Image: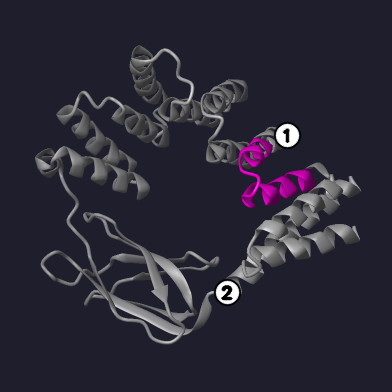
Amino acid sequence: MKEVKIIIFLLFIVCLSSNLLLSQEGRGEARLKGIVVDEMGNPIEGAKIELISLDYNLKMSYISSKKGNWSFLGLGKTVVKIISSKNGYMTTIIPELSISGIKNPMQRIVLKKAANIEDIEKENPKMLYLKGEELYKQTEYRKALIVFKEFLKKEPKLYKIRVNIGNCYIKLKEFEKAVAEFKLVLEKLKQENSDLKGNKIAASIYASFGELYMDKNELEKAKEYFEKSIDIDPSSYTLSYNVAEIFFSSNKIDEAIKYYNLCIKVKPDWQKPYIKLAYCYINKGEMKKAINYLNEFIKLNPETDPQTEVAKSLIKQLSEN
């Protein structure tokens, strides 16, 4: 029992030291300000402006004033993503914006009115697809679903869009509808070529099936589909990593270890799975293995990345216990 308490305490220290280190990064004396307007140039009050550092664990938000103004204080040198949203408008994203430590130009953000179905029907297929992808990235799954269906209506031969439709259904927890979409695509793929080996679309569908059954807490079925997915496309290290992440987040540590190792087998010079394997072995109480993986992570990870210091600190803590 004492050993379990030590492991839990160490994991708490990992999270705490990581958060303390990262929360201090990205801070400074700089200010970023701007205005949010509609397509006619009128200021929008009550828009939510979210700032997310791409370098550090720094998130800030602001609600625009009556004149559409917003600002963030206490910023340091970093690269940020800015997400602007309000009900009735399309979410606008600035994916990368460099912040200097001193002075930054004013940002003007334009929010477009949310499209209704009549507007969507007028779009050409290419624009529909891009709009659906953007909505999906913004977690607007219901709206993305409408757009992808409209695309399919215009381009029925491009049946592979049903994968996007199925993924929307998964996010909306409408699992039976998701399964129906995926099965239709698999049938078409098999008609074109009965051997699915190397088919990345088929691999992604089986991975989606696995995620679906994980959501339903049907672990054995999930494993079956994940294994099919990787068997079809064993060259995809990101696929193995994502499967490992799903198992790790569900506290299925042994399964996570299996897939993190598969990822390393395909791409041994990628640092991410090494630190995750260290966390897996900390959970199992196997500290020597955890330290070995942390050392591998440090060899591959940039010295300037705060996570390198976290890993070094963790090695010291594990070595002392």
Disc nearer the start of the sequence (2/1): 2
The amino acid pointed to by label 1 is: Asp
Q: Which residue is at a point 21% across and 23% down the rendered structure image?
A: 157
Residue 115 image offset from top left, x and y in percent:
17, 48
Q: Is residue 22 left or right of residue 75?
A: right
Residue that mark 2 sits on: 25
Quadrant position of the C terminus in the picture = bottom right
Q: Does the magenta run of residues contain 276? A: yes
Towards the viewer: 294 or 223: 294
Q: Which residue is mark 1?
A: 254
- Segment tinted magenta in the rendering: 260-283
Q: Which mark is residue 314?
A: none
Residue 178 in percent (x, y) is at 38, 26
Q: State whether the magenta stretch is mostly helix, strand or loop.
A: helix
Name the residue type under label 2: Glu
Residue 88: x and y in percent read 21, 54
